[in-house]
Amino acid sequence: MPEGTDPLERLRAQVDAAHAAAQRVAEQAAARTEDADLPPGGYAAREQAGAGQDNPEVRALVALIELARDLVPADVQQQVVELIRELLMLARALIYLIVSRLERRRPVGAEVEDIPLT
């Protein structure tokens, strides 16, 4: 096999390039927000929105998920998406069925019997 045609090596190179580009964009955005005069509420919102992004475990997990997604062929990805959609539709139908049964009222004229407690 000629050098540079290994699909796994190409994939690794693409992932490394994407990671480097994302890092550059994040650094540029951070530099712009440091120079901006944000109101106090803006700082709090920024801290909450960025929660977990500095965590290396979260970044590694996201990178692993993206790598696995990129390794799966497009037609298999489409089948998985359709399967998840069908499962969600099934869950919705089951929820509607359960709610409709819960909403049923007791039939009018139901016989009630008093039981003495002696």
Image: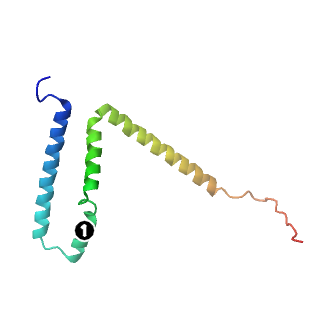
Q: Which is more toward the observer, 1 or 91?
A: 1
Q: Which is more toward the observer, 93 or 115?
A: 115
Q: Disc 1 on helix, strand or loop?
A: helix
In this rendering, the answer to whether 93 lies above or below 46 is: above
In this rendering, the answer to whether 5 lies above or below 50 is: above
**Residue at image location 74% in from the left, 56% down from the top:** 107
Q: Which is more toward the observer, 67 or 81?
A: 67
Name the amino acid type tagged 1.
Answer: Glu
- Which quadrant of the figure contains the C terminus? bottom right
Instruction: Determine whether, in the image, residue 94 is placed left or right of residue 6.
Output: right
Count residues near mark 1 (Cα–Cα under 10 Å), then give few for <14, some for 14-19, many for 20+: few
Give the residue number, with chain letter if any, for mark 1.
47
Instruction: Determine whether, in the image, residue 84 is placed left or right of residue 60.
Output: right
In this rendering, the answer to whether 80 lies above or below 56 is: above
**Residue at image location 24% in from the left, 75% down from the top:** 41
Outermost top residue: 1
The colour scheme is: rainbow
In this rendering, the answer to whether 37 lies above or below 105 is: below
**Residue at image location 86% in from the left, 71% down from the top:** 117
* Position in image of residue 77 (x %, y %): 33, 36
